[in-house]
Amino acid sequence: MSPMPLLEITSLRTEFSTRQGLLPAVDDVSLRVQPGEILGLVGESGSGKSVTGFSILGLIDAPGKITQGSILFEGTELVGASDETLRQLRGDRLAMIFQDPMMTLNPVLRVDTQMIETIQAHRSMSSEQARARCREVLVQVGIASPDERLKQYPHQFSGGMRQRVAIAIALLLRPALIIADEPTTALDVTVQGQILFEMQRLTRETGTALIWITHDLAVVAGLAQRVAVMYAGRIVESGSVQQVLNTPLHPYTRGLLDSVPANSERGQRLHQIPGMTPSLVNRPKGCAFRNRCSYAQADCAIDPPVQHFEQEHMVRCVRPLTEVKR
Amino acid sequence: MTTSPLSAQLVEETPWRQFVRDFMQSRLALFGLVLLALVLFLALFAPWIAPQNPYDLAKLDLMDSKLAPGSESMTGSIFLLGTDGMGRDMLSAILYGLRVSLLVGVVSGVIALAIGASLGVSAAFFGGRYEQILMRIVDIQLGFPAILVALILIAVLGSGVEKVIIALITVQWAYYARTARSAALVERNKEYMEAARGLGLPTWRVLLKHLIPNTLPPLIVVGTVQVAHAIALEATLSFLGLGLPITEPSLGLLIANGYEYMLSGKYWISVYPGVALLLTIMAINLVGDQLRDVLNPRLAR
């Protein structure tokens, strides 16, 4: 069948203990990423998409904990791996780009300090060699006059430039997988477009796989090859971009797509999904979406089964939209 | 991006330059800084500036005792600020006293900062029971009046410069620990800390290069204020006769020495050391206040 995946997550469960009880932020999540592939992880805020990303990197802090499942990365089991093993992987084979480019660079250190220290944390390389590599990567992400830029502090960069630096840092050691947690939401649409274009080019050039966490379906449509839609800590649908966006099987995915305002509906009332994301604490059994779902019936109160359709198109629903008229 | 005049300007504007420019905006703070520089200069070069070595008992003449400011000595030199009960030139005694006061204040302040900051930052970084225990100790320590703790310690340890320094460190470290912890708690939750961990940097490096430098601004502010406190506290201890030996008089001891002559009109023995102490502490506080304003992000313009 398919070659060995770069990343294989099997029934991952990450819980946070809160005053109100155990909160399963990620529940029974299974994902696969092939080398060089771009996966879009889509969901509303609080759907567990960021926690999934942090779980892969082993950056879940108390009161959070991975309580179940496995994360295989390049054949290494990351769940329960020692802090040192994880540390060596982070920044090297696995890199992360965070949401807010204003916040991810240390304000008191020059950009070159921050980039060189990342290299030297993983490779025994002289500062000169490391600097050369920094220059190379900055050019790669589209920053002109890298020598000048390296000597500057983060506050001297604009938002888009800072995000480029953050991306450059992620690329420094040629990771096999980059997890990008909504890295363009804080940016202008034009800058967002540039960054997306650069990312697409870079993954193609370097063969790096990418998990792009976002709530923006338009971004996914243009960037990713495969999509996984998360709702209330679970993946409710996954498949290729064409499958999921053109023929959504889960009512939630359908609702998400309908919520995107379209040109043809000018002046009409915009679509919305009624209700709100349920609280994850003491979640009742059954489909978490059923209270907002217009197709829901009594049997949705059972745990929805995972159903597979043609070519790895997966949906977790009692009555996926194939049976109902779209 | 090519180097336009604007970006060239941006390159010039380092955080340090911006800091200096902001600091200079207050005349009062500038005055404090100049005064502080003067005090430091006088204290540092006291042996070359002072007309007399007040520690050299052979140079003192009892016939010169309690002379008013401006009087002439037996040998013909002039005592600008008068003399004390032992015939010591007050100006020289004050210069040497400043030396001792500043030494004690700064050394105890720096050591207390180092100890308090490491404990506070590590408490915030590692958390858990370690943090709980440490911060409760800080709470208890801060529950007692500083002067009481210092008095007890001096009573147990005995007097002497190093004993006073130890007492002052014990009294002060908790302030630094509390400030460092709160600053570090704020910084720890910022995204760049998470990013640093996400890059797989070793823990010690995250702690030393990313966390500690970002907690420094509030610590510098507390530090300046605490040095002023330490000098005042040392003066209090010396005034009470518990601090430094009488052979190495600090400002507090000089004030105490003149205390008995106050009512007989010989004001200068107490008042001039008092003025010196006041000016020193005021200078430090002026600088400290401005530092607080400049380094406080909430007041940033």
Image (cartoon, coloured by chain):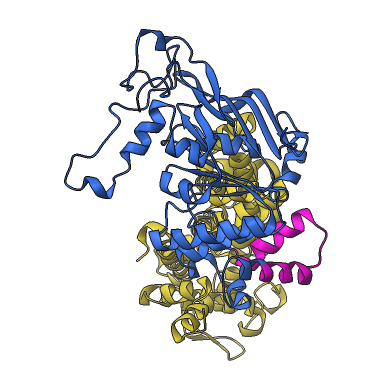
Chain colours: A blue, B yellow
Residue sitting at 50 percent across and 74 percent down? B36
| Outermost residue toward the right in this view | A124
| Residue B157 in the image: above or below residue A311 | below
Q: Quadrant of residue A45?
A: top left
User: Magenta span covers which residues?
Assistant: A109-136
- Asked if one can make out residue B167 in the rendered structure from this viewpoint, the answer is no
Residue B129 rendering spot, x and y as whole percentages: 63, 29
Magenta: predominant secondary structure element? helix
Residue sitting at 29 percent across and 45 percent down? A261
Residue A75 falls left or right of residue A37: right
Residue B265 falls left or right of residue B66: left
Residue sitting at 62 percent across and 61 percent down? A168
| Residue B215 in the image: above or below residue A211 | below
Q: Quadrant of the N terminus of chain A?
A: top right
Residue A83 falls left or right of residue B252: right
| Residue B33 in the image: above or below residue A291 | below
| Residue A181 in the image: above or below residue B16 | above
Q: Quadrant of the C terminus of chain A?
A: top left
Q: Quadrant of residue A7?
A: top right
Q: Is residue A119 highlighted in magenta? A: yes
Q: How many marks?
A: 0
Residue B265 rendering spot, x and y as whole percentages: 40, 69
Residue B221 rendering spot, x and y as whole percentages: 49, 59
Residue sitting at 73 percent across and 40 percent down? A86
- Asked if one can make out residue A191 in the rendered structure from this viewpoint, the answer is yes
Q: Is residue B77 highlighted in magenta? A: no
Residue B211 rendering spot, x and y as whole percentages: 60, 52
Q: Nearer the viewer, residue A107 or B168?
A: A107
